[in-house]
Amino acid sequence: MLVSCIRNNISFSQNLNHKMHDLSEFSADKAVMIHMTDYLPVNGEILSTKNVSKDKKGLRKPRNTVHFAFNHVVTPNSIGFNWNNKPIGIIIPFNKALEVNPKENIIGGEPSDFYIKNKVKLPQGTVIVRKSKKLPSGKLRVINAETINAMKNTKGIKVVETSDNVRDITNKCIEKMGYTRLDNLYSEATGRNEDLKYISGKIINRTINANQKISVAWSKMADNIGFSIYKNHQTSPFGRSEFLIDSVDILARNTNKWNSTISVYNIFSKKDEYIDIDYKQAFLGVIDSINKSLPPNTELSYDINRFKNNIKESVTPKDALDKLAKEQKIKPMGEDIGHVRKNTSPNKVLQIINDIVDLYSIN
């Protein structure tokens, strides 16, 4: 029913040049960036979390990047962040976004997690899907964005209102705009839509070939446009610097100690052995690694070396966070990573922190 409604009520100017018939055709002019959020852009700009998160104490969260997936709505990631029920989906033609946003703000990433620094100006041709409880299920309403007070200074942007799942409607609008869903094309290329066993040699070979095509196309885009390639936000210096603060917060909320002991099963003695973990030294090593990986003339969203001194000088993790708040007005992201609670086992705490910030120095 939803597909029928979109066909009858939404008319986008389609360009056949946006279509992809093979993964190797993935390029800037065939790409749209998708951003799922809780907030409507203000006067045609998506602001980073840091820009909009100031609390009553003047503290801000450190994330100074805006995140997108290409040609389909982002899927839940390995840490557990879920965008399935966000009330707003924003679809931005990539080549047009490059024209209206500063080149130095285009950081990079991968097709499923691409990030732009500070804020993102929406170009003409952008489509915003937003939840509206006033509409009956299966019905859509299209309005010009400038008729909404928060978007009154924009032009050429459409808003699609729906009472149905915003994720589903956003994915349908991508196709209605004339673009090819990258997730669907990938499924076709790998044969995952066919009646084949996943472990079959045919599926494996097709998957390797599909991944190679995307990798080559993505590398060409990175070279042509001038952005960096990161496996995911966690592996970038930007993401690691944010998750570093959350890792210190995990310790502060759990034991509020820099040192811990974990148990490791010895297969030879068939007994648990206990290993001491010095998180303070581990975090200092992470900061050194972040500094080494940061591109030249690039700044993070806070002074990580001042935070390094905070960690060095603090008796407890909470002390370090208090100093960060006082000196830089920065607080943890506060996301419920791994559902950490007080008295979570030391092994589980180590696993979660290692997953989000890569404690290479204690491996």
Image (cartoon, rainbow, N blue to C red):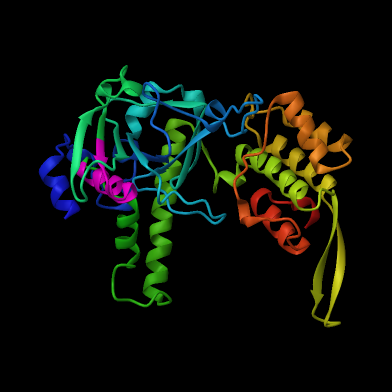
Q: Quadrant of residue 97?
A: top left
Give the tally of numbered discs.
0
Please give the name of the residue rendered at 29% of the width and 48% of the height, measured from the top-left corner: 171
Q: Please, is residue 207 above or below residue 54 in the view?
A: below
Range covered by the magenta-colored residues: 160-176
Of residue 131 and residue 102, the one placed in the foreground of this image is 131
Looking at the image, residue 179 sits to the left or right of residue 204; the answer is left
Please give the name of the residue rendered at 76% of the width and 24% of the height, measured from the top-left corner: 327
Please give the name of the residue rendered at 17% of the width and 36% of the height, measured from the top-left corner: 12
Looking at the image, residue 41 sits to the left or right of residue 162; the answer is right
Looking at the image, residue 242 sits to the left or right of residue 260; the answer is left
Please give the name of the residue rendered at 42% of the width and 70% of the height, measured from the top-left corner: 204
Which image quadrant: the N terminus? bottom left
Of residue 310 and residue 166, the one placed in the foreground of this image is 166
Which x, y percent locates residue 238?
A: 61, 37
Which x, y percent locates residue 306?
A: 78, 28
Of residue 341 and residue 90, the one placed in the foreground of this image is 341
Residue at far top of view: 153
Which x, y percent locates residue 191?
A: 32, 67
